Image (tube, grey):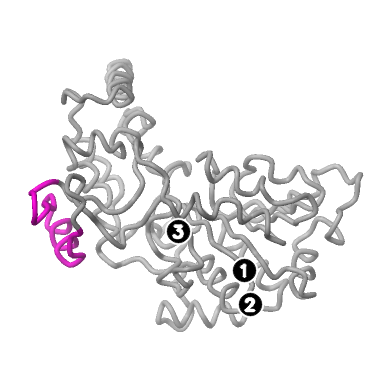
Amino acid sequence: MLSDQSARLDKDPPPLTLEDRSLESIANYVNDGRAKKIIVVDGAGISTSAGIPDIQSPNTGLYARLARLNLPPSPFMEAVFHISYFRVNPKPFYSLIRELYTGLFQPTIAHCFIRLLSDKGLLLKLFEQNNDRLSVLAGVPVDKIVEGHGSYADQHCIDCKSSYPSAKMREAILGREIPRCEQCHGFVKPDIMMYGDELPTAFTQNEMLPAESDLCIVMGTSLTAGNFACLPERCPQGVPRLLINQEHVTTLGSRADDVVLLGDCDDGVRRLAAALGWEVELQALWCELTRTEEGRKIGSEAQFSSWDADQMVAEITSDVDFSIDVQDEELKALMQRWQEQTSLAA
């Protein structure tokens, strides 16, 4: 169920750019040729209908699954994704990402919509928080994407920095083995950003681009990562910002030209495509990419059928050992907090 929440805003003063705060007004703005440099900021919410669970969704997110096991999610997930913990015990990390290497996941309607923006010459840049590369699979040009948290496309040794063959990486992970560097026998890690890592250069080089945009679309994200939360704020006053999301985030909805559409991302994108007159084109692209007559439709009951996420979470937790001695003070604090909260839960 979608809900247009733009009406909740104060109608005085009126919009500076749009006719009114509605999806139809956004569509008219694009079709009139006034939006030619569109920024898209997305998150895990655009990939959940592909079968990839996000972190924070109620019932299906990884945090909710951890809670069902009486495990405190925050220190747990932060530790598993902390580079210092990976250096001493990479096993739970690889248990978590194994299914991403199966090749079972296909682009969603939201990914296909971003591809259409690019095909029409309207996409200035996609700021991607996901590591699943479904936008690339959908055909969005790599030079149009800023992978702010890195990706699984390449991998390197964490010690000597040597590259590692993708085929061998996939074979090791699917075989439940830890990939080791062929040069120094160090652990190999995908080129994704972990806690304790620096931001990718591509992000710092492009983070001011929203100041040049004429439309910002934010989809499927809680925008809790500070570097991404700043992106919509850099759009000048008068530049329309559209939020398609399950919940309100940051200041989106507070400006005169903000439009807020709460609900499922794919449903919101379909509604936007219909307003733009792109609905048939979008559906055709989705069918082409998913190689079906009707596209790949996944309802909430069918989500994660190819990925037993509860089993995966149980496996990860059995791999975690918080008695390991580490030198990083931030990680030490996380591990201590984990032990304290686990004791209370017990």
For marks 3 and 2, the one nearer the N-term is 3
| Residue at 71%, 54% in the rendered image | 241
Q: Give residue 188's position: percent from left, percent from top.
A: 18, 51
- Horizontal side of 321 relative to 129 (left or right) equals left
In the image, taking residue 265 as reference, residue 20 lies left or right, namely right
Q: Which residue is mark 1?
A: 270
For the record, the magenta segment spans 163-186
| Predominant SS of the magenta segment | loop
* In this view, 64 is above or below 160: above
- Label 1 amino acid? Arg
At 81% across and 44% down in the image, what residue appears?
Answer: 9
Task: Kindly identify the amino acid type of the residue bearing the numbered disc 2.
Answer: Glu
Q: Nearer the viewer, residue 18 or 95?
A: 18
Q: Residues within 10 Å of mark 3 (few under 14, many from 20)?
A: many
Q: Nearer the viewer, residue 61 or 92?
A: 92
Q: Which residue is mark 2?
A: 279
Q: Quadrant of residue 55?
A: top left
Amino acid type of the residue that numbered disc 3 sits on in the rendered structure: Ser
| Nearer-the-camera pick, 268 or 43 | 43
Q: Quadrant of the C terminus?
A: top left
> Magenta span has 187?
no
Q: Which residue is mark 3?
A: 47
Q: Position of residue 2 (x, y in %)?
A: 66, 56
To which quarter of the image does residue 18 belong?
bottom right
